[in-house]
Structure formats: structure tokens, C-alpha cells
Amino acid sequence: MNTANTIDLYDAIKSVETIATAPDSALNNPKMYMNHILGELIYGEHIVRMINDAEQLENGLDIDLMDLCFIYHDVGRPFTYGLDIHEINSGIYLRSIGLDEIADIVQRHFVSYEKAKEIIIPQGIADIEPLEFIQSAWEPKVLTYVDLCVDSSGKYIGWEKKIDSFVEKYSSPERASPDMVKILEAGGLDRMKDICEEVEGLFEIIF
């Protein structure tokens, strides 16, 4: 049985909210965090249904599984202090509660590959294989696409605008994070653009 089919979405949302609002949470704004989660769930369902309706993928995407990925994709943020490796921390947490299938997808969203390759290994944080964090399947690609289309408040802004905002933010000397600068220099956001265009190719046929 698919694990995703046994988890109630409401319970999943409440569990993430409990983690986000815990006294030891690393989040500065749990309400905005939850708005992002809910906005991503709504937009993500829309995108998954469009992809499945376009019938470009042989077996389509499991909407129950993807819903849980949208809900849990940032569950590592409340456990992330200092260095931003929330994608990897999300995977670690999900495996600790037995959600390995979701963890495999969630740990690969956004620029987790570049974080592993350019930050985690060089800084000696962990001994891991970077390719474990690259988007090689459609599920993490679609999760990344949806994440880049929804801003921190849960509103749709489109991936182009969000990537531009990252470039602007991390190109500014007074706001630049040294680690994110490494990711920019490694072509992380260029790779995100390619993924977004690839995902849009799955459903552009219906427009």
C-alpha cells in the first residue's frame, strides 16, 4: 500500500504546524511559513492535475503523494539553525518518522544538490553523495517547480520572478550569504530555470 494513501492531509498539516510553532522552532515567522505551505499545496495540486490531464507521463503523478510532499517539503526549516540546509534536514526528519518515500523526494527540492556539493562536503558537515540530492525523477522536479512559483507568503509569483529575487538578493554585498553566493557561482539557479522549463513542457500542450 502506498504510504501516502494512509496519511490524512489535515493531520499532516497540523503536524507541520505543531513543529513550526514549537518553543524551540528556528522560525521567525511561523504564520508566514504555514501560508507558504498551504499556498504551495493549493497551487501544487493544480499543477499535478494539469500534468496528469496532459498525459505526457506514462503513469502520471500520484496526487496523494505529491500533496504530502508539498506539505512536508520545508519541515526541516524549524530544525535548521544558522546554515540553510533545510532540504536535507527535511529528509532526515521524514525518515525519522518512517516517511522514506516522501523524504526521497523532499530532500531533492530546490538547490539541495549544490548545497551538498558546494557547502556540506567542503565544510565537513557530513560525508554524503551529492547526486543523492539531485532532481533525477519527475516528482522532485515538480516539487521544485511549484516551490519556485510560490512566494514565502503563499502567493503565486511565478518561478522567473522568484529566481530573479534570489539573484538580486544574493548579488547584493550587504545582503549576500557566502554560502548562497557559492550556489549562484556553481550555477544552481540556472539549473533551477532548466527544471522549471522542463516541467512546464509537461503541460504546455493543454494551453
Image (cartoon, rainbow, N blue to C red):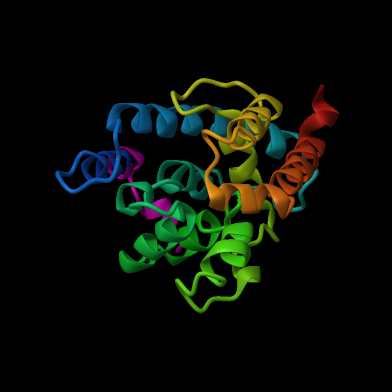
Q: Residue furthest left?
A: 23
Q: Is residue 61 left or right of residue 81?
A: right
Across and down, in percent, residue 25 comes to 23, 46
Report if residue 2 lies within the magenta region: yes
At horizontal 62% and vertical 28% (from top left) the residue drawn is: 165
Q: Residue at x 51, y 54 (%)?
A: 106
**Residue 142, position as x, y percentages in the image:** 64, 44
Toward the right, the furthest residue is: 205
Residue in view at x 62 percent, y 47 percent: 181
Nearer to the camera, 207 or 116: 116
Nearer to the camera, 178 or 140: 178
From the image, which quarter does the N terminus lie in?
bottom left
Please determine whether, in this image, residue 96 is positioned above or below residue 61. below
Residue 11: quarter of image: top left
- The magenta span reads 1-12
Q: Is residue 2 visible?
A: no
